[in-house]
Image (tube, rainbow, N blue to C red):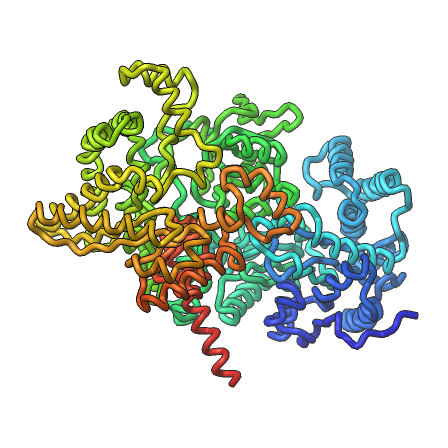
């Protein structure tokens, strides 16, 4: 006999009292915590119990054996449910049926498993028929149970069941499941049992407790199912959380026209509008709505047909929102006129909806601004910057479905998730077209530009997952008929084949033939209000990486407080100046290089004039030339011959020069300040261009704050030499213009040696800017350009938690930064420090930068809003941590 565990692994809820509560998501999962909280609020919830996430984790640690005492606790709590419901699992006269559902801490819609109607067998179905007087309902419940148990618990291909059901409907001359009679469904059950036996090699289990054990195992197992693992990777959910398992007495929405089921949101999840956004089906079970098996009805149908249940639902959803102080996702069932709540959790929403809901709830006095700021995931803000269809464009709209997730998408039609992933890996833009999506499609949905489904509603799997991802989605488009085997869909007589282009408008639900022109979105008033709130809390400055006046203007509009990295080499690749650059590279002596650079000087000066104007009054950090010179030359003989002809230079000379410039490891070669030291005339020209532009604008009354940055410094003497050169050129230029412009000279910290000798380097620097792209490369000793071949394998095998080029490696690269900050500020207490790698737009990296005391982060223009919000959240988290520590003293 198993030894009883003292640890509580099972939590009961029912009868207005629960063992747990809504704050216990870590232990009970989101669903279990929600059921416990609703029970404690005296909301009608069918009795049940939750097996904890700890039990799930121990199950896997014990090589898929239940932890000590768990099963005994399950049996004890099942007795409580039986007593409360007045029924018994497996009883021949009053049988209890239960649902078995997963429920992780974080909502993962459709990613894990659910089994309904557990407890049915040949004996209990007769009792159910006798009890309800509804033979059709009983056999409908039984065929659903066999389908779910067979496919989810035993791995039988669900399509085998679906195909048989469709064949029986066809033989009976009916279109809908609800048109099948009790006799028809009895035949379906017989056929399903045959499929089950052929597929598994065993009879369908009749012992309810055997059914229960296998279902619990399947729910636990689904935590490491392919689709759940993929979803966690996409959304950054840790795998050590485990899932809870909820066992709950069944209530039935398919007992006739006085029964129904539905899913809803307490506010519109697409727009954030303050209205009840829900759908229902009459005489159906919940899976029909969520899985998109039948296209649901507007919630007003429930109001018309079952007004008493609707009125109670209206009061409950308002009570729940007021209690949770957030927009909620709810599930409900009406059984013979009586309403039961089956789930409540914080609802997934679009970025636009998230902003509106947060702002409205502050105005309504429901939450404060700090809470509003912490509610929005910084990554969600990307959704607001997605393209939309040009309103001036002429469109060929071929069909219209439900506007399930806003935005617009253009791509080639693809019919399977696997093919969508394959095409996306090749760089192709695709639209995933499905009859309805299932959790197995998660990878293809992520890879696609947008999703189109023929069935399903606004709360279907496709709709919920697409909104969470920020993907454009049109759902329930009944006008399209998909023939997946022949890789085409039809709209009336029009045939759209795989590879044809279509456009989706997720805001209107329109399906458009061909590639519609897309335009950038305009930010709403809500966005401006929210970002102003965020700026009121953040301590970190947020700058942008910008190389052109246009980029600088875009970034300023997004709230950038300056430029943290202006890469001058990007300007050299312009068609009107590349020939001068190449002339400079090919020159045999200093005089020749200076002659070529003189042609570039007015061009560079023009660049800086435009950038300084766009950033007037804000600092602009300009990195002097960084990449090796060979990057500016073509590499094939054909390209070299064309260039030689154009430049009137012998081909052999050009080829020879190209060979001389070739390096085995250019990332660590003749680049950065090493170029400035060997060819100082390059940095002379660039410094002169910067300062001439600054002086001219100052004379026009425009404030300019230039920060000149020397790249790839590894030794203090490199910076000392380059600083002296810059100061001399600046001084000469300012004398020439008879004006003075304040400026600073600093360096990038992108080499480990620079970090560990930062105290020496600080003596020659006015600021440090961490070039975390190169610092990551040189700390790890790997090439960013080549690491893509093996880094995904490192993530998959959990050697690394994250790609270090996306999220800053805090233990290694981050430690280098900490060393540099500590040493640098020992020499100069107020030494300004920032980060200019793309990590400046990653929320977790931004939080780290806040913690270690940087002054600013810098990122690409479209990630500026994300960085601003991440900086505000970092400051608020720090304050909350301090407040918490004070309260515990």
Residue at position x 61%, y 49% from top? 231
Q: Is residue 507 above or below residue 44?
A: above
Residue at position x 75%, y 40% from top? 158
Q: In the picture, residue 689 is in which quadrant?
A: top left
Q: In the picture, residue 867 is in which quadrant?
A: bottom left
**Viewer can see residue 547:** yes
Q: In the picture, residue 661 is in which quadrant?
A: top left
Q: Residue furthest left?
A: 738
Residue at position x 70%, y 64% from top? 53
**Viewer can see residue 380:** no
Foreground: 101 or 495? 101
Give x and y (percent) for residue 372. 42, 65
Q: Is residue 650 above or below residue 850?
A: above
Q: Quadrant of the N terminus?
A: bottom right
Q: Determine whether, in the image, residue 735 is placed left or right of residue 219.
A: left
Q: Residue furthest bottom?
A: 889
Give x and y (percent) for residue 536. 32, 66
Give x and y (percent) for residue 608. 21, 42
Give x and y (percent) for residue 214. 82, 55
Q: How many marks?
A: 0
Q: Determine whether, in the image, residue 178 is placed left or right of residue 195.
A: left
Foreground: 100 or 337? 100
Q: Determine whether, in the image, residue 189 is placed left or right of residue 478.
A: right
Q: Is residue 585 above or below residue 730?
A: above
Foreground: 757 or 374? 757
Residue at position x 34%, y 62% from top? 855
């Amino acid at each position: 006999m198993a030894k009883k565990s003292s640890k509580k692994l099972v939590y009961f809820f029912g009868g207005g009292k629960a063992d747990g509560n809504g704050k216990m998501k870590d232990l009970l999962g989101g669903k279990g915590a929600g059921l416990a909280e609703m029970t404690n609020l005296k909301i009608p919830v069918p009795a049940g119990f939750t097996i904890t996430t700890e039990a799930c984790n121990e199950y896997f640690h014990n090589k898929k054996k239940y932890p000590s005492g768990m099963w005994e606790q399950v049996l004890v709590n099942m007795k409580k449910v039986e007593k409360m419901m007045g029924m018994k699992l497996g009883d021949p006269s009053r049988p209890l049926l239960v649902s078995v559902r997963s429920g992780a801490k974080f909502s993962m819609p459709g990613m894990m498993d659910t089994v309904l109607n557990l407890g049915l067998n040949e004996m209990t179905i007769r009792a159910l028929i006798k009890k309800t007087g509804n033979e059709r309902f009983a056999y409908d419940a039984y065929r659903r149970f066999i389908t779910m148990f067979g496919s989810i618990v035993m791995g039988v291909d669900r399509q085998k069941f679906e195909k048989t059901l469709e064949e029986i409907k066809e033989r009976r001359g009916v279109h809908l499941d609800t048109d099948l009679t009790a006799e028809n469904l009895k035949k379906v059950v017989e056929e399903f049992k045959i499929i089950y036996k052929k597929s598994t090699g065993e009879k369908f289990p009749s012992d309810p407790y055997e059914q229960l054990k296998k279902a619990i195992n399947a729910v636990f197992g689904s935590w490491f199912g392919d689709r759940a693992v993929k979803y966690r990777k996409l959304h950054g959910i840790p795998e050590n959380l485990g899932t809870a398992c909820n066992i709950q007495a069944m209530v039935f929405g398919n007992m006739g026209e006085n029964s129904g089921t539905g899913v809803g949101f307490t506010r519109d999840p697409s727009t954030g509008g303050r209205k009840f956004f829900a759908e229902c089906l009459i005489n159906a079970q919940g899976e029909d709505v969520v899985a998109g098996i039948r296209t649901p009805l507007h919630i007003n149908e429930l109001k018309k047909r079952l007004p008493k249940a609707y009125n109670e639902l209206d009061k409950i959803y308002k009570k729940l929102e007021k209690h949770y102080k957030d927009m909620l996702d709810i599930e409900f069932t009406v059984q013979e006129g009586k309403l039961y709540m089956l789930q409540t959790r914080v609802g997934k929403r679009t970025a636009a909806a998230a902003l509106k809901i947060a702002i409205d709830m502050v105005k309504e006095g429901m939450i404060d601004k700090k809470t509003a700021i912490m509610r929005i995931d910084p990554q969600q803000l990307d959704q607001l910057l997605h393209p939309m269809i040009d309103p001036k464009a002429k469109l060929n709209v071929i069909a219209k479905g439900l506007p399930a997730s806003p935005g617009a998408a253009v791509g080639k039609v693809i019919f399977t998730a696997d093919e969508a992933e394959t095409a996306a890996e090749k760089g192709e833009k695709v639209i995933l077209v499905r009859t309805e999506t299932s959790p197995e499609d998660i990878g293809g949905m992520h890879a696609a530009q947008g999703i189109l489904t023929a069935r399903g509603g606004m709360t279907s799997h496709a709709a919920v997952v697409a909104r969470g991802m920020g993907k454009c989605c049109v759902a329930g488009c009944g006008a399209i008929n998909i023939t997946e085997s022949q890789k085409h869909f039809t709209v009336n007589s029009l045939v759209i084949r795989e590879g044809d282009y279509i456009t989706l408008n997720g805001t209107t639900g329109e399906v458009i033939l061909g590639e519609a022109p897309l335009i950038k979105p305009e930010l709403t008033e809500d966005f401006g209000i929210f970002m102003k709130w965020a700026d009121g809390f953040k301590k970190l400055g947020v700058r942008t990486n910008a190389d052109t006046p246009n980029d600088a203007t875009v970034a300023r509009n997004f709230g950038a407080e300056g430029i943290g990295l202006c890469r001058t080499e990007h300007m050299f690749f312009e068609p009107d100046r590349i020939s001068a650059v190449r002339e400079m590279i090919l020159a045999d002596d200093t005089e020749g290089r200076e002659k070529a650079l003189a042609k570039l000087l007015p061009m560079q000066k023009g660049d800086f004039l435009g950038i300084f104007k766009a950033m007037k009054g804000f600092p602009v950090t300009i990195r002097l030339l960084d990449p090796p010179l060979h990057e500016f030359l073509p590499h094939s003989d054909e390209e070299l011959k064309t260039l030689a002809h154009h430049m009137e230079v012998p081909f052999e000379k050009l080829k020879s020069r190209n060979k001389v410039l070739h390096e085995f490891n250019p990332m660590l070669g003749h680049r950065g300040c090493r170029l400035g030291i060997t060819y100082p005339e390059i940095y002379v020209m660039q410094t002169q261009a910067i300062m001439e532009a600054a002086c001219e604008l100052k004379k026009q009354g425009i404030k300019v704050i230039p920060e000149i940055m020397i790249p790839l410094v590894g030794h203090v003497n490199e910076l000392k030499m380059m600083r002296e050169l810059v100061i001399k050129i600046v001084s000469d230029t300012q004398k020439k213009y008879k004006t003075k412009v304040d400026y600073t000279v600093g360096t990038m910290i992108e080499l480990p040696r620079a970090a560990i000798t930062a105290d020496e380097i600080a003596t020659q620097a006015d600021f440090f800017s961490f070039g975390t792209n190169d610092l990551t490369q040189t700390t790890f000793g790997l090439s960013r350009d080549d690491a893509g071949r093996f880094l995904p394998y490192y993530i998959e095998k959990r050697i690394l938690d994250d790609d270090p080029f996306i999220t800053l490696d805090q233990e290694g690269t981050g430690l280098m930064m900490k060393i540099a900050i500590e040493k640098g500020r020992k020499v100069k207490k107020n030494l300004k420090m920032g980060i200019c790698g793309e990590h400046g737009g990653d929320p977790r990296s931004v939080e780290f930068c806040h913690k270690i005391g940087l002054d600013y982060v810098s990122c690409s223009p479209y990630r500026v809003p994300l960085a601003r919000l991440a900086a505000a959240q970092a400051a608020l988290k720090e304050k909350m941590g301090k407040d918490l520590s004070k309260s515990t003293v």
